[in-house]
Amino acid sequence: MDTTQMRTWAEISLPKLEHNYRVLRACIPAGCRFMGLVKANAYGHGAVPVARRLKELGAEYLAVACVEEAAQLRQAGVDGPLLILGAVPPGEMPLAVELGATVTVFEPEGARALSRAATAAGKTVKVHIKADTGMSRLGFPAREGELERSGAEILAACALPGLEAEGIFTHFANADGDEAYTMRQLTRFLELIDLLKGRGLEFQLRHCAAAAAVLHYPCTHLDMVRPGIALYGHYPDNDCRDLLPEELRPVMTLKTRAAFVRPVPAGTPVSYGCTHVLARDSIIATLPIGYGDGLFRVLSDRWKVRVRGRLAPLVGRVCMDMCMIDVTDIPGVTAGDEVEVFGGTVPVEDAAALAGTIQYELLCHVSPRVPRVYLD
């Protein structure tokens, strides 16, 4: 794809995705399966191309958040095991069954509704039981004092017609910050599994480790892991950097081009609200990227982008479709020059810190109108 004619684009490096996959795969034991998370448009990277590459690399499972995301992959010809991690409304259960997706079951009534949808279609749907061990989001309660009741409900759910209980999983709430709480969650999860096994119900796939747990706690790997942000080249926390034999590589680089460059005299206000007034005669470049593309407005007057190998500060407020940078100290900047907004040499983590959020959010908020260009 010719980027010279693009206003703004995101470069997605599939070789870097492969590198990260292999680095993570080397951290898990032989026989442990790898679930590639491609929910939220593969964290903004493009679900279909990423899913295809992960399957080529050998990922045994893929995961999405909702039925719509599962349908997108199936319509693109992505087959194989696919787990819907989130809640599936009863009205969408027939489509989930038709797609051949694995469905998360986290409470009795949802299990019964899924059973009705499966039997009506004359099919069997694989399910993964979700246990709430301390996230307080979705799942059969699995805290102390709750195991007996939840165990009985899970046994009843897994005995329903049309359902095949393939897996059971939980999600850690603070694996990147609190070892004691994470181990408490793991203990609750294993106690629930043992209770169910004692009553005749065993699961082929037990999984609980997302990126932080994959890196920090090998004891959580069990039968399958599901690293998310690390797959895309970003660490869930800084302490993870020393836990891998090789550095992860950011897969996405967000780029734009200078659309207009001109001298502007000292004392001139820049952008909405006139909040930035130039203190000197300056060279201002206008970039065709704004918060409508995913460049957070809160980064106004705070972020720096890279042009001609040097950093240039944003000046004035980020607009919906444009922003301005000061290139006075960077000789030779002209319209058409490529600008790196974040990615390879301008860490998205730094932008996230300035915005008071996490890198996940900035990656996911790169707008659908920004074309993804896949480098292979």
Image (cartoon, rainbow, N blue to C red):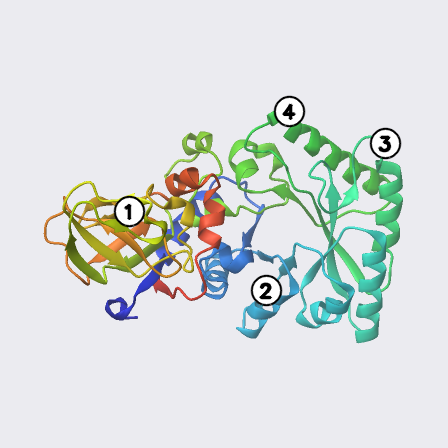
Residue 303 in which image quadrant: top left
Q: Residue tagged by mark 2? A: 69
Tell me which residue sits at (85%, 42%) in the image: 150
Compare residues 41 and 284 and report the one nearer the observer: 284
Distance, label 3 to label 4, CA atoms, is 19 Å
Q: Earlier in the sequence, mark 4 or mark 1?
A: 4
Disc 4 marks a residue whose amino acid type is Ala
Q: Tell me the crowding category of disc 2: few under 14, some 14 to 19, or many 20 or more residues within 10 angstroms, Cα based.
A: some
Left or right of 216, for residue 191: right
> Mark 4 against mark 1, which lies toward the viewer?
1
Which x, y percent locates residue 206? 68, 45
Q: Residue tagged by mark 4? A: 180
Disc 3 marks a residue whose amino acid type is Gly
Distance, label 4 to label 1, CA atoms, is 45 Å
Distance, label 1 to label 2, CA atoms, is 38 Å
On screen, residue 227 above or below 41: above
Q: Residue tagged by mark 3? A: 145
Left or right of 295, for residue 181: right
Residue 289 in which image quadrant: bottom left
Disc 1 marks a residue whose amino acid type is Val
Q: Earlier in the sequence, mark 3 or mark 2?
A: 2
